[in-house]
Image: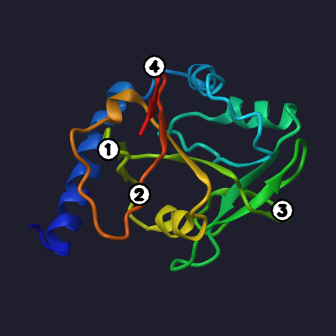
Amino acid sequence: MNTEAEIFLQKQTLREEIRLRRNYFIHDAGAEDFLLQIKKLCLDKYKVFASYVPLSFEADVSLLNEYLLQEGKILGLPEVVANDKPLVFRRRQSGDAMVKGRLGIAVPVGEEVIPEVIFLPLEAFDLQGNRLGKGGGFYDRTLQALPNALRIGVAFSAQEVSAVPVLANDEKLHIIVTEKELRFI
């Protein structure tokens, strides 16, 4: 059994490995590939979604975000309010202003929304639904605070690993979407 410190080190090593590999797969797929896969999910019954503004190295969900708004869904984007708190999702509407948030990430100025479905970026994932984020614990705290939300990780297929090192407070995914397929956990 690995200690918490050993698992933390394994996670850091895996993040570095994925970041080195990222240059080889980042341009293989576009936003339309992810939207095509996500449209295969039956998400019509849900009204409130959370997504993210993709950074240059993350799976591009920009078309998904536009699609959700066009479909009349409520879209929330994450805001970091404190380093030790869950994320808050601010409502995004077409044409609304975005401001620079705490970590330099653009956030809408809309009211807080509570999502039923959360699309989240991944550094790595495995087929048991384990996920590796950037290491701040923001999504783990958020998923713990929203236990009934459907959790959908979005990543490039090349980000799949055989096993993600996990700690007791790491939260699992329900579905993984890659540019090639859907994986139900």
Q: Residue 97 carries which label?
A: none
Q: In this view, does 53 lie above or below 176?
A: below
Q: Position of residue 93 (x, y in %)?
A: 87, 47
Identify which amino acid the numbered label 1 is placed on: Gln
Q: Residue 109 carries which label?
A: 3
- Per the image, the residue denoted by label 4 is 180
Identify which amino acid the numbered label 2 is placed on: Lys
- Classify 10 Å Cα crowding around label 4: few (below 14), some (14-19), many (20 and above): few
- Classify 10 Å Cα crowding around label 1: few (below 14), some (14-19), many (20 and above): some
The disc, 2 or 4, on the residue closer to the chain's N-terminal end is 2
Q: Do the residues labelled 2 and 1 touch (CB within 8 Å)?
A: no
Judge by depth and name the residue closer to the eye, 55 or 174.
174
Q: Position of residue 61 (x, y in %)?
A: 62, 35
Q: Do the residues labelled 2 and 4 touch (CB within 8 Å)?
A: no
Q: Is mark 2 on a helix, strand or loop?
A: loop
- Classify 10 Å Cα crowding around label 2: few (below 14), some (14-19), many (20 and above): some
**How far apart in space, not on screen, are marks 3 and 1 (Cα)?**
36 Å
Report whether 79 appears left or right of 69: left
The disc, 2 or 3, on the residue closer to the chain's N-terminal end is 3
Judge by depth and name the residue closer to the eye, 178 or 99.
178
- Classify 10 Å Cα crowding around label 3: few (below 14), some (14-19), many (20 and above): some
Judge by depth and name the residue closer to the eye, 180 or 44.
44
Residue plotted at (9% across, 67% down):
1
Q: Can residue 158 be seen in this view?
A: yes
Residue 163, quarter of the rendered image: top left
- Per the image, the residue denoted by label 2 is 134
Q: Is mark 1 on a helix, strand or loop?
A: loop
Q: Can residue 99 be seen in this view?
A: no
